[in-house]
Image (cartoon, coloured by chain):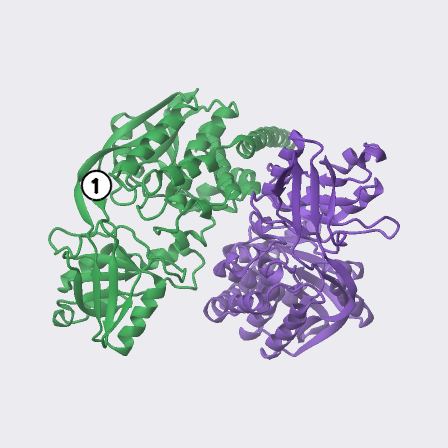
Chain colours: A purple, B green
């Protein structure tokens, strides 16, 4: 009995070892391909420099769709296609202007309109300011004291957090819900401190929301440096007036597309493993980290698998989602089609956290279930993966959750992401070639492992 | 028997858990202190912007010693002192010039003298060029074909390496030993491709070596962009001539200092745990990542321990070494004094790999011995430490090895380090505040853990 058990153990252990070795060789092969012949970086350069910021509905978004389709087509995948989807078409208009007026002195502020915001009157908006750090604080005020004023949400990113994502989570409701909360109290406009630890002159845009039942008031974001300036001025003179002007507007929805490339699975062709990022970006920068990086990593993860001669057992796809930034219509459409086409998505990986060095991979799995994948984690360790954890999910892949798909978030090192996020500073030169490439390799490896062994 | 064993297990397990919790609380306390009141970043700014590049023997190096002494003194450590040490005094002289002349066409090259190099004749040096990738290639040539020429060592950083440090290890002998090898064959000068993956216009300096028995020929480094230009020109015309001029020289040694701060151990005062970086830097940049980061991290690791109310059981020191870059006299002096003062150094931690996010901690321990520290690794995981490994050591702490000290290398994420290393581009703005601070916290934690539990 003992020796039989030992035998089983040896067989099991050896086969595991052989698989590990085979996998580690394949991953190394993909690494070599990426670092010798990879296209992640040159494609990102094209997307950022030749196309640029590409908000849904813009000519640049259309150009990005065409470019991605053509690029993927040229690789020789089994199929490449477009998924039509209607998307919002918000335009920023003229360059925003703002200043604060205190005791006859004008101090200009660096602002930008929040995405989806309505514009101000043509001549701009001028009013006194109520500064608050939380919605609770605002709600506790009398309507009278807020009415006709501009609400300034000034809660900063907390410093004492390990993850900048949690700092974002802690503050972003000011941007997303600020105009609704302010309008409920009778305010006529909103200015929000930018969502970042960085202390600089770049205002950070990002989507805001309205409710049909509540007046739509214009919202803008102010750079962190000018946020402090504004607070200082208001402290010295609570009657200081803020002026801002933005001509942004929401136009009728337009037709756009998700771009999908596929390699058919050899054994389980109707089981899908997808990796995706979003092809749209904010208009003010080049969408380099957000999410040009994820776009080219998804494209090249598939490319590395193809060029390393891997025949995946399950079908694998690179999905470039449209309209993550201000509507999520692409992610919703993808899940809707997956459902109606009865495609069983066993795993969806999202890369939308910047082109930095790999760190963590989050799964919508319990800690106990994650233990099964320790060997995978060890395979990816040399390429920068520190740990698998329970922080699975992602905006674009979220809608797949209802068909039971395991959602996987790629989380590279995140200390710098919000320095660039949604600003004119999110440009190609901020992405490090090798760091981007490590991400492509890790994503390709993960797609390969799941397509080979399932979850 | 069973229940006795269980009892032992429970007692052991509980006491371990209690220690873990106490330590995790203390580490979190240090994190809060650094991120609320830390001085790492502001001190780095001072060192880079008010003092700047500080090569051994320079007025800036003297200013750095005075500043560090004063800063540490003001913290209230048990003692702060200077260790006198004679150091080399090399000066770069006038701005270096270089061009390549082919068929009457001059192409300028971006170069800098290698540290410790002799100058060219006042009027410069002009000769034909022999391009080689390895010493073997050079040695295989006839003396006749090399004599009177300039040897161009052009082996690039390999792309397909996981760690940039290994790319450096693979190529840096061209810089360190190139002039010796070239002179052996009768060459009159050396030009070396810069040690970096970056493709840009910054030449990278760094120490080169001579032997008294071999003629000292001048050596310079060329930027990677111009390295490729030079290779292209030589390919088209092997008779192209290279001109370069540098007025650098080695002056007599001067008196300088290591700076040391100490908190006395409460239980084992003659057992030492030190953390150090080097206070000197190359002259061409601001020495921000190399090694202003390590300097302020060492100073602030001690500061966090003091300000968190920790009374270390073993004596702990921050050591700022002088002359790491072109002589290592500070590291040698420190070990000599430790020996003669009979101070038992149980661990020496070196931080000299940039102010990036923590990644690995290397120990001069075997893999089996490292397993004992799994709990520590887990404590440091949230602050960025992926793994403890066997890559212990460091230039400045190396001389302590002979007294049996465990050498510990702090290895932050290394993909960008050699982009800046030894260039005029190694400036304060390249260091990310939060990343630097995470390093300080990890180093403070490690010093605390070793001082508390030994090794």
Q: In the rendered image, which quarter is residue B60 located in?
A: top left
Report the residue marked by disc 1: B88
User: Which quadrant is the C terminus of chain B positioned in?
Assistant: top left
Q: Residue A267's x, y, as percent?
A: 68, 74
Q: Between residues A100 and B258, which one lies in front from this camera angle?
A: A100
Q: Residue A225's x, y, as percent?
A: 58, 41
Q: Residue at x 24, y 38 (%)?
A: B57
Q: Between residues B107 and A432, which one lies in front from this camera angle?
A: B107
All told, the count of numbered labels is: 1
**B143 vs A193: above or below:** below
Q: Residue at x 45, y 48 (%)?
A: B430
In the picture, measured across the screen, residue B212 lies left or right of residue B228, that is: left
Q: Residue at x 23, y 56 (%)?
A: B177
Residue at the far front in the pictured view: A104
**A323 vs B317: above or below:** below
Disc 1 chain ID: B
Q: Between residues A8 and A150, which one lies in front from this camera angle?
A: A150
Q: Residue A191's x, y, as percent?
A: 71, 44
Residue at the far right in the pictured view: A213
Label 1 SS: strand
Q: Between residues A163 and A170, which one lies in front from this camera angle?
A: A170
User: Which quadrant is the N terminus of chain B positioned in?
Assistant: top right
**B95 vs B129: above or below:** above
Q: Residue A249's x, y, as percent?
A: 75, 59
Can the viewer see residue B5 in this picture? yes
In the picture, measured across the screen, residue B231 lies left or right of residue B391, that is: left
Can the viewer see residue A332 in this picture? no
Residues packed near mark 1 inside 10 Å, few (<14), some (14 to 19) or many (20 plus): many
């Amino acid at each position: 009995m003992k020796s039989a058990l030992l035998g089983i153990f040896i067989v099991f252990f050896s086969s595991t070892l052989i698989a590990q070795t085979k996998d580690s060789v394949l991953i190394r092969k993909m690494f070599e391909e990426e670092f010798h012949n990879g296209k992640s970086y040159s494609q990102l350069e094209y997307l950022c420099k030749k196309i640029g910021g590409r908000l849904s509905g813009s000519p640049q978004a259309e150009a990005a769709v065409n470019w991605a389709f053509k690029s993927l087509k040229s690789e020789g995948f089994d199929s490449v296609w477009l998924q039509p989807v209607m998307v919002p078409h918000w335009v920023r208009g003229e360059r925003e202007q703002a200043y604060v007026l205190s005791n006859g002195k004008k101090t200009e502020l660096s602002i930008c309109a929040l995405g989806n915001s309505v514009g101000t009157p043509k001549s701009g908006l001028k009013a006194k300011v109520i500064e608050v750090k939380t919605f609770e604080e605002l709600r506790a005020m009398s309507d009278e004291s807020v009415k006709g004023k501009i609400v300034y949400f000034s809660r900063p990113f907390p410093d004492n957090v390990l993850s900048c994502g949690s700092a974002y989570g802690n503050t972003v409701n000011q941007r997303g819900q600020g105009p609704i909360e302010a309008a409920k109290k009778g305010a006529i406009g909103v200015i929000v401190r930018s969502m970042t630890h960085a202390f600089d002159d770049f205002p950070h845009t990002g989507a805001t929301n309205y409710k049909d039942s509540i007046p739509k008031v214009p919202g803008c974001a102010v750079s962190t440096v000018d946020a402090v300036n504004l607070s200082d001025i208001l402290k010295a003179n609570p009657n200081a007036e803020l002026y801002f002007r933005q001509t942004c507007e929401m136009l009728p929805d337009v037709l756009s597309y998700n771009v999908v490339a596929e390699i058919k699975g050899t054994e389980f062709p109707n089981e899908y493993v997808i990796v995706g990022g979003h092809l749209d970006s904010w208009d003010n920068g080049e969408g380099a980290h957000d999410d040009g990086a994820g776009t080219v990593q998804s494209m090249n993860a598939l490319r590395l698998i193809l060029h390393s001669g891997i025949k995946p057992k399950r079908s694998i796809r690179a999905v470039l989602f449209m309209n993550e930034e201000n509507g999520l219509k692409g992610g919703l459409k993808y899940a809707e089609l997956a459902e109606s086409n009865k495609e069983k998505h066993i795993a969806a990986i999202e890369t939308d956290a910047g082109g930095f060095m790999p760190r963590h991979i989050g799964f919508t799995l319990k800690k106990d279930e994650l233990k099964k994948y320790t060997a995978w984690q060890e395979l990816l360790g040399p390429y920068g993966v520190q740990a698998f954890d329970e922080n699975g999910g992602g905006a674009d892949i979220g809608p797949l959750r209802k068909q039971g798909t395991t959602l996987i978030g790629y989380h590279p090192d995140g200390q710098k992401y919000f320095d660039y996020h949604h600003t004119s500073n999110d440009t190609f030169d901020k992405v490090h070639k090798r760091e981007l490439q490590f991400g492509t390799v890790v994503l390709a490896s993960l797609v390969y492992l799941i397509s080979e062994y399932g979850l």
